[in-house]
Image (cartoon, helix red, strand yellow):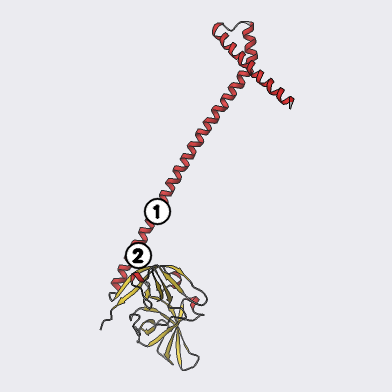
Amino acid sequence: MFQRIFKKKITIWILILAAVLLLIWGLLSIFSDGSTVFHRAVRAVSAPVQKMFTSASNRVSHFFSAYTRYNALLEENERLREENYAMKEAVRNADLYRVENENLRALLDMRQRHTDLTLESTMLIARSDTAWSSVITLNKGESEGFAVGNGVISREGLVGQIISVGAGYAEVGTIIDTKVSVGALISRNRLSAVTKGTLDLMPEGKFQLTGLPRGSDVRPGDEVETSGLGGMLPPGLLLGTVESVHADSSGLGDYAIVKAAADIENLSQLFAITAYSVSD
């Protein structure tokens, strides 16, 4: 401990001596031509100290210069981040406007195609597809006039029927769900039938068309539409296309495998039928 105190005092005295020598050297520089022996001796002794102070001064200068550059880089980085955020926000807003415009055009097109329907545009916000059911959730509900039993369509055809509704949401059982059954017709010959969802066909986006008499005139490629029986759905909504026809297990009737017209796995904008009129 004594040695540390001694070394510290020695260092202080050396610095004091160096400062005195620098002061004397400065005065001599002012009042003499620098040729005296004493002046040269002072210069010789003080040169290392002067070099040390100059080095220290340079380091301090470099530090503050680097600090200034660092602050400038931080400010530039923050400015670029703000510009990047603004650009992303502008792109996002442009996408929202584009989607909104597309939705409005789609709604206008659907209303022109289905003048007998009162349609409310809506969006899919969730789906709960499992091995046992195919149900989707919409972003509108009671306040927009949605009710249980209302049909929901896409541009391609019937998606399903509302099975539950609340404030700001509606749940829809799709046409391939096992709990959804719709009165149907073969478009070509007006042959009546009923849709039926099955667990084995659900993953393929297909359903059965049941209630067909044995040997019915039903062919692959026939289109199937709603019959309007029961009053919940309007007639003439496209349900799908027949892929194949088979005898049922009883041997007394036929059933058809139908590919749903609506792409159940890739739904986005939809239209709820809140009312409709039937022409005579």
The one of 189 and 170 positioned closer to us in this rendering:
170
Q: Position of residue 132 (x, y in %)?
A: 51, 77
- Identified at 46% across, 40% down, the residue is 76
Which residue is label 2 attached to? 103
Q: Position of residue 124 (x, y in %)?
A: 42, 68
Amino acid carrying mark 1 in the image: Val
The one of 15 and 45 positioned closer to us in this rendering:
15
Amino acid carrying mark 2 in the image: Asn
Label whose residue precedes the other's in the sequence (1 or 2): 1
Question: How many callouts does the rendering have?
Answer: 2
Q: Position of residue 69 (x, y in %)?
A: 50, 34
Which residue is label 1 attached to? 91
> How busy is the neighbourhood of tag 1: few (under 14 within 10 Å), some, or many (20 plus)?
few
Q: Quadrant of residue 242?
A: bottom left
Q: Say which element carries label 2.
A: helix
Q: Quadrant of the C terminus?
A: bottom left
Q: Are marks 1 and 2 in contact (CB under 8 Å)?
A: no
Q: Is residue 142 left or right of residue 25?
A: left
Q: Is residue 56 above or below residue 237?
A: above
Q: Say which element carries label 1.
A: helix
Q: Is residue 233 left or right of residue 33?
A: left
The image's mark for residue 213 is none
Q: Quadrant of the N terminus?
A: top right
> How busy is the neighbourhood of tag 2: few (under 14 within 10 Å), some, or many (20 plus)?
some
- Identified at 42% across, 46% down, the residue is 83
Q: Is residue 78 above or below residue 14?
A: below
Q: Position of residue 260 (x, y in %)?
A: 42, 77
Q: Quadrant of residue 186?
A: bottom left
